[in-house]
Amino acid sequence: HELLRPYIKMYSYALVIFDFEGCGAENFKSQQQIELDVEVLLNKNGWNERNAAIVIKPELENWIWQDSIHVEKAIGWTGIESLYTWARAEGKIAHGDQKPLRPKETLEEALRISRTAKSASIYKQITKSVSYKGCTDRAFLKLLSTLITWFPSL
């Protein structure tokens, strides 16, 4: 909140996004409580209801995990089985779950198997080709809702 204070008059909104894991409060506060704490601090610091905090649980890589051929193409997956079949067979995605318990590590392992270097272009390719409409991640839905509220004409 202190880092954003100098920008209060320059910008209409402040959006703070960070991973739950490694944030320093994950062992004693919930995802929602951390978001609320940051938003309260931003309000007290002058952002006055023109802010949102989004904590991604467990981490950003969770957002790219979609059972889609487009994700496989983006990471160069050429395995005999689908990426999701591989992840389930390896115990990375529990029965009944849609995403790996450790999305970052699972992605990194899939990239190693695919012999694909981690790159921002992977994320760009996924966001261009995979629809967000089926996403059920709470943090992503909060981001979407916040952006729609702030910019309704988009």
Image (cartoon, rainbow, N blue to C red):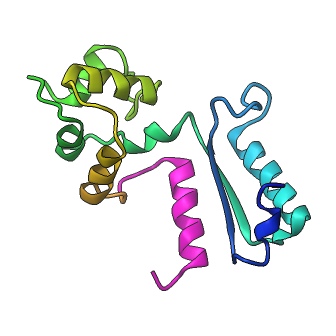
**For the point 43% across and 30% down, which residue is it?**
103
Is residue 86 part of the magenta span, yes or no? no
Q: Image check: 109 left or right of 82? A: right
Q: Image check: 140 left or right of 16? A: left
Q: Image check: 100 left or right of 144? A: left
In the rendered image of this protein, does residue 13 appear above or below residue 52?
A: below
Camera sees residue 41:
yes
Q: Residue furthest right?
A: 44
The one nearer the camera, 50 or 86, is 50
Where the N terminus falls, by quadrant? bottom right
Camera sees residue 93:
no
Q: Position of residue 128 (x, y in %)?
A: 28, 59
Q: Position of residue 77 (x, y in %)?
A: 17, 31
Q: Position of residue 54 (x, y in %)?
A: 64, 52
Q: Which residues are magenta?
A: 134-154
The one nearer the camera, 12 or 82, is 12
**For the point 63% across and 30% down, which residue is it?**
21
Q: Residue furthest left?
A: 80
**For the point 55% across and 66% down, which residue is it?**
145
The one nearer the camera, 124 or 83, is 124
Quarter of the image holding residue 115?
top left
